[in-house]
Amino acid sequence: MSSHADPVLDDPPDEVPDAREFIEAAMRWHFDPDTGSPYWLKRARTLGFDPRRDVHTLDDLRMFPNVANELRDVRVEDLIPRGYGPEPCVVGVYESGGTTGPPKRVVLLADWLDRVTRRAMRDMDERSYPRGVNWLFVGPSGPHIFGELVARQALARGGVRFSIDLDPRWVKKCIAEGRLDEAERYAEHLIDQATFPLETQDAGVLITTPPLLERLARRNRLVDLVNEKISVIVWGGAHMDPDTRHLLRTEVFPKVRLYGMYGSTMILSGLAERAGLTEDDPCVFDAFSPYVSLRVVDPDTGEDVPYGERGQVVMNHVSKGMLLPNNLERDLATRIEGPPGQLGDSVADVGPLRTFENEQVIEGVY
Amino acid sequence: MTGPVDLDALGPSGPYRTRQRLTVTELGGAPVAELSLVPRLFVQRTMAAQHDAPAMPADERARALRRAGELFATADVGGMRVEDYQHTVSRVSGMPISVVRAATRRIEESAAEAYRATQYARPTGAVNDWRDPLTRSGRAVWTRRGDVFAVHAAGNHPGVHTLWLEALALGYRVAVRPSRREPFTPHRLITALREAGFAGDQVTLLPTDYSVADDVIRNADLAMVYGGEEVVAKYGGHDTVLPQGPGRSKILLTGDDWESHVDAVVDSVSAHGGTACVNTTAVFVEGDPAPVAEAVAERLSAIPTLPPQHDEAVLPAQSASGARDIEKYLLDHAAGAKALLGGEGVADDLGDGSAVLRPAVFLVDRADAPQTGIEMSFPCVWFAPWSRADGIGPLRNSLVLTAVTEDGDLIDRLMEEPTISNVYLGDVPTYWMASWVPHDRYLAEFLMRTKGVVRA
């Protein structure tokens, strides 16, 4: 079986396709009985609209329900567009962290991996990441796409990836059960392990999560090693508040360049912090247009908030290999105008949806 | 009034203003201050610096504490006059201003007395310094259990900030996480301590949001945490955390002459605006509690409703919605009790978005009624009958128990009961305090240990 993909879906990574043309082509691909995935073809029957007829723009993607939760149960085979033929080039199957309930699964296909890796190379060039150095990754690998993408990018950049695995589900479970000592012990175990490659190996890039970076920052010996060896720190996988970011940049790792990465399993990629931000700028993430686009909406009404206001992040992934539109993430962010030509918004100062405060305690004097 | 003031964190190298700020409001909702909330990393780094900092010599500490108390109570501190400080505390916490003024004086006295106060807790066999000649033949030296002491402070009463001054006097480096409801008192006090000679790494103010609160404790050697049952449940088993839980102070009246104790009961219920852990929550009366309760209710009902910043105000205020929540909670839990005062509600709206909480007096019909443990942050008291047959069971779990009784055996049992922290005998209000009398054990019992020392 041959694929009937519109060439616009296969545009070279350094070309940015026209958004309308691209979205229309993607709808034809994902909802054509010959090329769409079994999941979407079946799901289309209950959508109440015909994506091939009705969906042309980013705004039109709002017609789709948020189907992310259905990815907990769907057979992964059913997620692959039939247009890839009987032997699609599958890199792997990856899972969400599992914050709430069973994990959601996505399929990573080779053409998307290639696209996202090339994009990452371009981003890194713009930010002057070193080439030919090794990377130290302390974060979720295993079923999670973060570690996989980092490994590919380290290789593409001419280095190898040293890896310390973090199982975020275990940490979340410990915390949910109130076993904070266990979570603490596990996190310290990870930092203990990270010490070995930092001490004995050459590594120029450190990639980890904000909580682990904070934890690493407690150990003076490791802070010295990082300042001495590492030229770029990339953080992702969790939020970093602006005050922590400022402290890390100015006081803890003054000799290292710090970049954020806003990623999600559900977009099969991470978005790099905008290059050239000054000390006083918020941490802005631009989209990977038109494949990964963002909106920032009022959680109550679902309408876009004005630029500069905080709202909940909606992510769209539209590519040849996957369609996951209108996915409301559990993140709040400031809506920022994107660079010229970008589909949708950029976001800044991404933070958690809610900090639960038990302010109102009535009984007692304290 | 100008716009909200910036209330910075106080880190090792001075005031620290963050991007994440919390607006502290008056009860009516008007913003008063922008409180900088520090992230976990700042807590870590600050407290690491405190661990590394050497303690000041004891004599300098005592002198600087005394000086800080004077500054706190009399001077412009961080550009704020003491009158403005008191007015602000009254407007954000709803505490009657006379209570804030009295607390200001008490903080001054406590600062002056902090070192002396610690010495009451020193075992008679222990000396303060290894250089004491007594160590030549073997002696205990009184030493700190750690270097850094953290406080999760409460905002109910400025007086909570008298206790940790003793830790400072003992050479601890102290980190205070203020209540976000009333951060003004510790901010002023720590600023005054710094002006009086404590270096930035000796005492810090670390306002944080809820998610970082535990880090303040985790990064300390020892910690003191104010809170309710949940705090006691969370930290009760840790020997490095001292919970300051519910007060549930009580009065026991035996004998026939209850009339001469009505004053003490009324005062115990209503002093400090009823917001303190040493305010009386329940009164147990041998025989019929109704006449006492009625007399107390009559007296309390005469207290006027006044805004908290009024010189004559006695009752505390809350935001109007907060007051309604408190009222609902109280009435929801009063089932089975007979209301003598406040049965129709306790929230008295001031019309400016705030409401005064008026006194409540209830009668329950047995000594072990569950309501006798309901401690509220305004004058609210439960009267219960008590007989010798009830024993001391209903009197347990009391920060202070005032017992009007001549029964030596009963007093013995109260003394032996481990869940009663203080026993006051006779016509003494439950809020009575003196710097040489422990509040809930001496804090120094928790902070210090003895170490055997001998010199050959």
Image (cartoon, coloured by chain):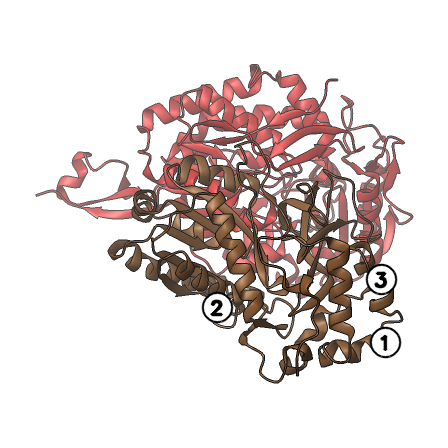
Q: Which residue is drawn at 69% across and 25% down?
A: B4
Question: Residue B170 appears at what percent x and percent y?
Answer: 37, 35
Q: What residue type is labelled 3?
A: Gly
Disc 2 is placed on an element classified as loop
- Left/right placement of residue A120 relative to residue B31 reads left
Question: Residue B309 appears at what percent x and percent y?
Answer: 76, 24
- The residue pinned by badge 2 equals A167
Chain represented in red: B
Question: Residue B245 appears at what percent x and percent y?
Answer: 59, 51
- The residue pinned by badge 1 equals A46
Q: Which residue is drawn at 37% across and 38% down?
A: A255
Res B14 visible: yes
Disc 3/disc 1 C-alpha distance (Å): 56 Å
* Disc 3: host chain: B
- The residue pinned by badge 3 equals B336
Q: What residue type is labelled 1?
A: Thr
Does residue A59 sit above or below B66 in this rendering?
Answer: below
Comparing labels 3 and 1, the label whose residue is closer to the camera: 1
- Binning the other alpha carbons within 10 Å of mark 3 as few (below 14), some (14 to 19) or many (20 upward) gives few
Comparing labels 1 and 2, the label whose residue is closer to the camera: 1
Disc 3 is placed on an element classified as loop
Q: Residue at x 67, y 66 (%)?
A: B389
* Disc 2: host chain: A
* Disc 1: host chain: A
Q: Chain A is drawn in which colour?
A: brown
